[in-house]
C-alpha cells in the first residue's frame, strides 16, 4: 500500500475487469490459468491459506526471507524438470475464464512469456496479452483508443 501510494498506483483485486477504451479487459496474475501444473496449483492453494500465511507472518523477517529464497530455489529446480506446456496457461481455461468474465481481452503475467495472442471466443475476436518479468527488461502495455501495444525496455 505504501509503495502504491508513493508510485501513484492503485492496488486492485485479482480478477478485476476494467474498461480499456471501450474494451472490457480482465486483469489477472495468471497463475490460476496454469491448471495443468498440478504441483504449482497445490502449492498455490497452500500459500493462499490464511492459516499458512498467519504462521509465516508470525516468524521473524530473516526467517521469512530465508524461506522465500529456499522456495524460489526449489521452484526453479522443479521448473527445470517440467515440460514447457505444463507451465503455460491452459487455452481451454483461458477461454472459460474470459467467457465467465464476459471479456474479449485478458492481460496477465505469471508465465512471463511476453506475447500478444489472438483467439476466437464464441465467434468473436479476442486477445490475451502476457507481460514479461522484470529481470533484464521492464514491461508495460501502452493503450489508447486505436491500439494496445506490449512494450519493453532495458533496466
Image (cartoon, rainbow, N blue to C red):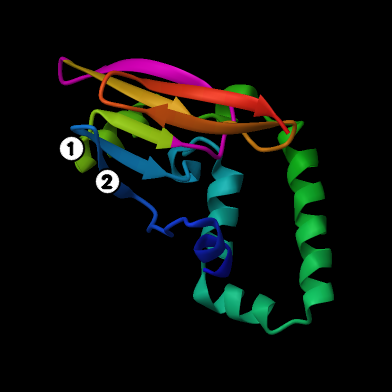
Of pointers 1 and 2, the one earlier in the residue sequence: 2
**Magenta stretch encompasses residue 114:** yes
Q: Residue at x 56, y 63 (%)?
A: 6
Secondary structure under the numbered disc 1 in the rendered image: loop
Query: Could you tell me residue 79's position as x and y percent?
Result: 71, 36
Q: Residue at x 24, y 28 (%)?
A: 104
Q: 67 left or right of 142?
A: right
Q: 5 left or right of 137?
A: left
Q: Front-most of 25 and 121? A: 25
Start and end of the magenta stretch? 108-123
Secondary structure under the numbered disc 2 in the rendered image: strand
Residue at image mark 2: 17
Residue at image mark 1: 102
Q: 147 left or right of 80?
A: left
Query: Could you tell me residue 25's position as x and y percent?
Result: 28, 37
Query: Could you tell me residue 32's position as x and y percent?
Result: 45, 45
- Would residue 8 be visible to someone looking at this image? yes
Q: Quadrant of residue 123?
A: top left
**Magenta stretch encompasses residue 61:** no
**Callouts 1 and 2 close, C-beta under 8 Å:** yes
Q: Label 2: few (<14), some or many (≥20) within 10 Å?
A: some
Q: CA distance from mark 1 to mark 2?
A: 9 Å
Indicate the quadrant containing the C terminus: top left, top right, bottom left or bottom right: top right
Q: Residue at x 48, y 23 (%)?
A: 150
Q: Front-most of 84 and 69? A: 69
Q: 30 left or right of 72?
A: left
Q: Front-most of 54 and 144? A: 144
Amino acid at each position: 500500500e505504501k509503495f502504491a501510494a508513493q508510485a501513484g498506483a492503485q492496488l486492485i483485486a485479482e480478477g478485476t475487469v476494467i474498461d480499456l477504451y471501450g474494451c472490457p479487459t480482465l486483469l489477472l496474475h495468471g497463475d490460476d490459468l496454469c491448471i495443468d501444473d498440478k504441483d504449482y496449483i497445490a502449492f498455490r492453494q497452500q500459500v493462499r491459506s490464511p492459516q499458512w500465511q498467519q504462521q509465516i507472518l508470525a516468524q521473524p523477517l530473516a526467517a521469512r526471507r530465508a524461506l522465500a529464497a529456499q522456495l524460489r530455489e526449489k521452484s526453479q529446480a522443479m521448473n527445470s524438470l517440467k515440460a514447457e506446456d505444463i507451465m503455460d496457461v491452459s487455452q481451454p481455461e483461458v477461454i472459460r475464464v474470459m467467457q465467465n468474465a464476459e471479456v474479449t481481452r485478458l492481460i496477465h503475467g505469471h508465465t512471463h512469456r511476453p506475447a500478444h495472442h489472438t483467439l476466437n471466443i464464441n465467434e468473436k475476436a479476442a486477445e490475451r496479452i502476457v507481460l514479461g518479468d522484470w529481470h533484464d527488461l521492464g514491461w508495460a502495455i501502452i493503450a489508447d483508443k486505436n491500439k494496445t501495444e506490449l512494450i519493453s525496455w532495458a533496466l
